Image (tube, grey):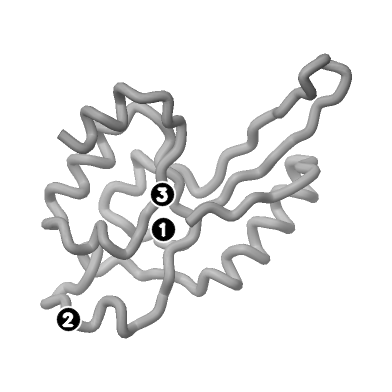
Amino acid sequence: GMMKMLNEVPIDYVTWGNHEADIPHKTVCRHVKEYRGSWLNSNMQTHAAMGHQKPYEVIEVRSPDGSHTRKVGLVAVLSDEADLYKHFAAPGAFGGAKIECPWETLKKYKQLLEEEHGCDVVVPLQ
């Protein structure tokens, strides 16, 4: 039901939240593969379904009259707060994927998106 609903409404991007760890990992991986939009994941790159996710996205936003265009970088970070995940049995939350520091990840992608992709602004999603 959840993925069917997300695929039917005009939602282009989703990202991880710590409560996705409450869903069986096999089910979550299936959800990632079923989602027709872009699933952004900037700081959990070792996730089993990373092949169906993107670390970032660059979009262009135009002013209503079309006279201005801006490049916007989208990144998505998940908390690496250990207390959120300590109750999960091995291999751990998200199938044991390593969650990188969100602050370091944001710095890394801000630099990449501004310098290599010419983004005017980088928006962190959570």
Q: Is residue 27 left or right of residue 70?
A: left
Residue 11, percent from left and from top: 42, 31
- What amino acid type should be assigned to the residue bearing mark 2? His
**Height in image: 126 above or below 7?**
below
Residue 17 falls in image quadrant: bottom left
Residue 76, which numbered label? none
Q: Is residue 7 left or right of residue 120?
A: left
Cα gap from disc 2 to disc 1, whole angstroms: 22 Å
Mark 1 residue element: loop
Residue 21 falls in image quadrant: bottom left
Q: Is residue 16 left or right of residue 1?
A: right
Question: Residue at point 71% right, 28% down?
Answer: 61
Mark 3 residue element: strand
Residue 101, percent from left and from top: 50, 74
Q: Crowdedness of circle 1 by 10 Å Cα count: few (<14), some, many (20+)? A: some
Residue 15, which numbered label? 3
Q: For the N terminus, which image quadrant? A: top left
Question: Residue at point 15% right, 57% down?
Answer: 23
Label 1, on which residue? 45
- What amino acid type should be assigned to the residue bearing mark 3? Thr
Q: Answer yes or no: do the residues labelled 3 and 2 have beta carbons within 8 Å?
A: no
Cα gap from disc 3 to disc 2, whole angstroms: 22 Å
Q: Nearer the viewer, residue 121 or 118?
A: 121
